[in-house]
Image (cartoon, rainbow, N blue to C red):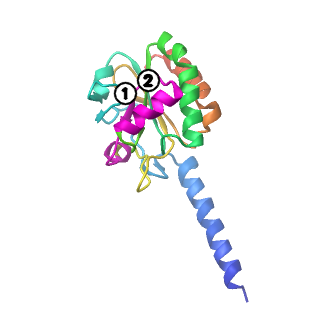
């Protein structure tokens, strides 16, 4: 007879394997919701920003590549590292006409403090109700998940990154942007 503890451990292990499979093997139905389809228009959005410009819309960046990255929370270790890496590579993004936009459920004031603390020179957007995170399949009930989307200059979604590793993510994004820019669609 199997013990209750062994049963629960087995059940949890099975659940973890299932979630990992859903998140990584089948990106159309990743943890956080259904992903928007690649090679189709990216979901439009307008969100308040820390930059003092009021709000930012995806359509504001027509003609530029957009790196739209979702993250859980300002000032946490992984989110700070990821933002620092994007900032470290910001000149490389600017050289290739790409705009970085960070999104979390934190409010504009938190984003402003985070940018000041870390020297971030790209916009952070306040998705306080999670609506944009939901539209991009990056919502986990109370926070955004660590997902990134590359959107081309015409507003077409070209790449989705799930299971992001903050320390190397900016390098991965730059490499993928290079590949995408050399491809004619």
Q: Which residue is found at the position 60% from the left and 36% from the top? A: 166
Judging depth in this view, the residue of 144 and 106 nearest the camera is 106
Q: Which residue is found at the position 35% from the left and 33% from the top? A: 42
Q: Which residue lies furthest to the bottom in this view?
A: 1
- Residue 122 image label: 2
In terms of sequence position, does the residue under pointer 2 or pointer 1 come before the other? 2
Q: Give the range drawn in magenta.
A: 108-134
Q: Is residue 119 visible?
A: yes
Residue 91 in percent (x, y) is at 53, 13
> Depth-wise, is mark 2 or mark 1 nearer the camera?
2
> Up-down: is 140 above or below 171?
below
> Up-down: is 35 above or below 66?
below
Q: Is residue 179 left or right of residue 60?
A: right
Alpha carbon distance from label 2 to label 1: 21 Å
Mark 1 — residue? 156
Q: In this view, does 78 lie to the left or right of 42?
A: right
Q: Which residue is found at the position 26% from the left and 28% from the top? A: 54
Mark 1 burial class by Cα count in 10 Å: few <14, some 14-19, many 20+:
some
Q: In what element is the residue under mark 2?
A: loop
Q: Quadrant of residue 123?
A: top left
Q: Residue furthest right?
A: 1
- Residue 8 image label: none
Q: Which residue is found at the position 38% from the left and 17% from the top? A: 64
Residue 56 in percent (x, y) is at 30, 28
Is residue 127 highlighted in magenta? yes
Q: Is residue 98 left or right of residue 19?
A: left
Q: Is residue 30 left or right of residue 157?
A: right
Is residue 149 highlighted in magenta? no
Mark 2 burial class by Cα count in 10 Å: few <14, some 14-19, many 20+:
some
Q: Quadrant of residue 142?
A: bottom left
């Amino acid at each position: 007879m199997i013990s209750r503890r062994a049963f629960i451990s087995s059940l949890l292990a099975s659940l973890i394997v299932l979630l990992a499979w859903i998140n990584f093997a089948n990106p159309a139905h990743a943890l956080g919701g259904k992903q928007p389809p690649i090679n189709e228009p990216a979901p439009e959005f307008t969100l308040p920003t820390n930059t003092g410009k009021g709000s930012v819309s995806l359509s504001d960046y027509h003609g530029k590549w957009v790196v739209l990255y979702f993250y859980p929370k300002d000032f946490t270790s992984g989110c700070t590292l990821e933002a620092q890496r994007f900032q470290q590579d910001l000149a490389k993004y600017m050289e290739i006409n790409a705009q970085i936009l960070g999104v979390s459920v934190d409010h504009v004031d938190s984003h402003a403090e985070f940018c000041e603390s870390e020297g971030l020179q790209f916009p952070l957007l306040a998705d306080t109700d999670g609506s944009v995170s939901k539209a991009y399949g990056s919502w986990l009930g109370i926070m955004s998940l660590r997902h990134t989307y590359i959107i081309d200059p015409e507003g077409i979604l070209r790449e989705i990154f799930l299971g992001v590793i903050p320390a190397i993510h900016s390098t991965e994004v730059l490499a993928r942007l290079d590949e995408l820019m050399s491809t004619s669609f």
